[in-house]
Image (tube, helix red, strand yellow):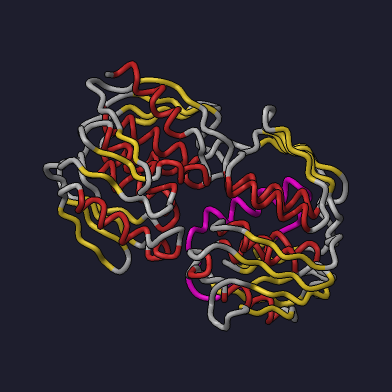
Amino acid sequence: MSESLEILPVSKPVTGRIRPPGSKSLTNRALILAALAEGPSHLSGVLDSRDTQVMVESLRRLGIAVEQDLTARTIDVAGCGGRIPAAGADLYLENSGTSIRFLTALCSLGEGRFRLDGNARMRERPIAPLVEALRGAGVEARCELGGDCPPVVIEAHGLKGGDVRVSGNLSSQYLSALLMSAPGARSDVRLTVEGELVSRPYVDMTIRNMEQFGAEVTEPTENVFVIRSRPYSGCRYDIEPDASAASYFFGLAAVTGGTITVEGLSKEALQGDVAFVEALARMGCQVEYGTSEITVRGGKLKGVDIDMNAISDTAQTLACVAVFADGPTRIRNVAHMRLKETDRVVAVVIELRRLGLTVEEFPDGLEIHPGPIQPATVHTYDDHRMAMSFSLIGTRVPGVRIADPGCTAKTYPDYFVDLERLCRGAR
């Protein structure tokens, strides 16, 4: 709350084109795969943000050579062939969930003692399902403080392979972490998901990434994955723009009745969050798909009842679009949002109420009732998605300020610069 940014409303529909920065999800996955590969990899379109910076810093601590060109948005990685060079390391991952989960599994391939920790919020975010899965695979792993959260300590002696079981109901990242490290095991891995699997599109994205680096993954029955034991192959890999970040610009078209084209994405994109535009179409927008771009045209918005389990990272965006719809919007099946950078269900409910709206909270989501909106400073809870999603309301309503706008550095440092560029001509 030390600083805030007032969002200036527009007076007419916003029209424009934009290419968001590279996907955080794809960047951090590609860094893991390139690190484990035999031979060098060249990554282009790389996102430079706090989440990716802590990943790069950690890989270097593990003895993996990583050379980054910030201007060209490229990274060159000298792969370790599935064997961690460092004989132990202390890694600090701030509040990057992908980094700590992916690296926890990666460290199990090493030889030595590895400790992974984060900030105060990270110490509240569960990692026990991943730790338990590794222990079931014969890895000496534990949550250092005795609970379900980091710090994590691993006494690594390599990953033997065989049958591994993991819970999938809290986060798909546990499964993705195990999938990506499995080719470095001493024998093939049969990975079984126990219970519900949330955010399945992120798992599909992980597998497609792995295959691009030469992995062999099959799914003989639903949510049972067999991964062949063999190193990845280094390659050249271009990273798509971030589909979750694109949701804010698609949302901008929706709330202002404008037309926004996002370059670099298509209906066949690796990232499941491109399906956010289908939610907007249900609300009354028009969507056009090109070979390498997606356009959203705003229309008269109507409330919807929608299951957003598979694209929960865009649920906050939809909640902020929903305040301008005719009729209530119910967002369902997103209980796992409570375990993100903040409890995102509670945070959205509190901040929409701060703006004067009527919002109901449920165990698995929320319901937004449109109505008059009052000026307020929106608290962001050190959550980049709170800042970016609530900025959309400010493009229509005067007096909306975003507290701690710098928190967007986690995934999109220049978000407010890009938002202002698009909106400037519509005032």
| Residue at point 73%, 63% (across, down) | 106
Q: What stretch is highlighted in magenta?
A: 192-217
Q: In this view, does 247 lie above or below 305?
A: above
| Residue at point 38%, 34% (across, down) | 250
| Residue at point 54%, 45% (across, down) | 271
User: Can see residue 288?
Assistant: no
Q: Can you tell which quarter of the image residue 323 is in?
A: top left
Q: Is residue 193 in the magenta section?
A: yes
**How many tags in the picture?**
0
Q: Is residue 134 in the magenta section?
A: no
In the image, 28 versus 257, the foreground residue is: 28
Q: Can you tell which quarter of the image residue 364 is in?
A: bottom left
In the image, 215 versus 81, the foreground residue is: 81
Instruction: Give percent across and percent down for residue 154.
Output: 72, 74
User: Can see residue 200?
Assistant: yes
Instruction: Give percent across and percent down for residue 303.
Output: 21, 46
| Residue at point 24%, 63% (across, down) | 361
Instruction: Give percent across and percent down for residue 385.
Output: 41, 47
In the image, 148 versus 61, the foreground residue is: 61
Q: Which residue lies furthest to the left in this view?
A: 372
Instruction: Give percent across and percent down for residue 363.
Output: 30, 69
Residue 108 horizontal side relative to residue 364, left or right:
right
Residue 196 horizontal side relative to residue 285, left or right:
right
Q: In this view, does 356 lie above or below 145?
A: above
Q: Can you tell which quarter of the image residue 259 is in?
A: top left
| Figure quadrant of the C terminus | top left
Q: Residue furthest top?
A: 425
